[in-house]
Amino acid sequence: MFKNLLKFIVMAPLLMATTCEDDLEENTIVYNVYKTQVTPEYSFSMNDTIWISGKISSKVYDEAVNDSIFLENPHTDEFSIHKFIEPTEASNCKDAVDAFELIINKGQLSFMPSCENGKLKAFPELENNNDYYSYRIGLKPNTNGDYVISWPNSMLQNFNRNEFIIDNYPIENHPNQIGFNSCGTVSWRYLNESDKEYYFTVE
């Protein structure tokens, strides 16, 4: 037992040093954000497929070496899908992944445990030229209605995001906001402070 304790005492500083070095390296990396785009239409039929594509550079800037380096393990791109509902006191849309058939054209997709019917996580693939990681996911609707796709961090490239759709769903107690009901948990986002939502209709 004493030998094991002594071994731990000797190894502990080395383990701590390795952890600190990893943390220091992580802190010197400047990460990029995904650039995303959705099929540029405001109205779709049940026979259409709405394509979501995302791209991120395979290079990140390392302040420790003052240069760009190749990113071996890119982070995922997270987004949510909600359907607009008759506004309640707190929300005007609810989780709606089940309103679509998911089609994976490039990359991989997983459901986020916090709300599997609302939040998705896309895993990109390295492109052939090694310059970018990208993914492409299709949504084939099975239910009519008005919808919104929302990203917490990505840069949505669509110039026209069809914001007029949300005008039909005002929340009395939360003016000029979207109230996302994600599996019973509600969060809000001010419309005039966000350009990370894409709105569309399925007819």
Image (tube, rainbow, N blue to C red):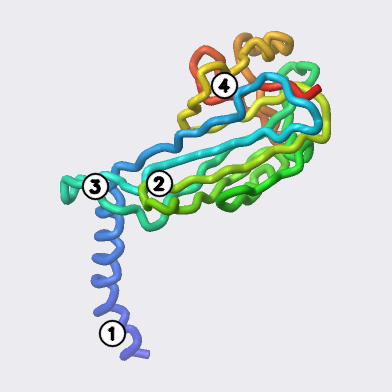
Quarter of the view holding residue 175: top right
> How far across and how far down the image is residue 53, in percent?
55, 38
Residue nearest the viewer, comparing 6 with 61 = 61
Query: Which secondary structure, mark 2?
Result: strand
Residue that badge 4 annotates: 189
How far apart in space, not on screen, are marks 1 and 3 (Cα)? Answer: 42 Å
Residue nearest the viewer, comparing 159 with 10 = 159
- Side of 84 where 2 appears, left or right: left
Which class describes the residues within 10 Å of circle 4: few (<14), some (14-19), or many (20+)? some
How far apart in space, not on screen, are marks 1 and 2 (Cα)? Answer: 48 Å
Disc 3 marks a residue whose amino acid type is Ser
Query: Which secondary structure, mark 4?
Result: strand
Give the total of numbered labels: 4
Query: Which secondary structure, mark 3?
Result: strand
Quarter of the view holding residue 22: bottom left
How far apart in space, not on screen, are marks 1 and 4 (Cα)? Answer: 54 Å
> How far across and how far down the image is residue 23, in percent?
30, 55
Q: Residue at x 74, y 32 (%)?
A: 48
Disc 2 marks a residue whose amino acid type is Tyr
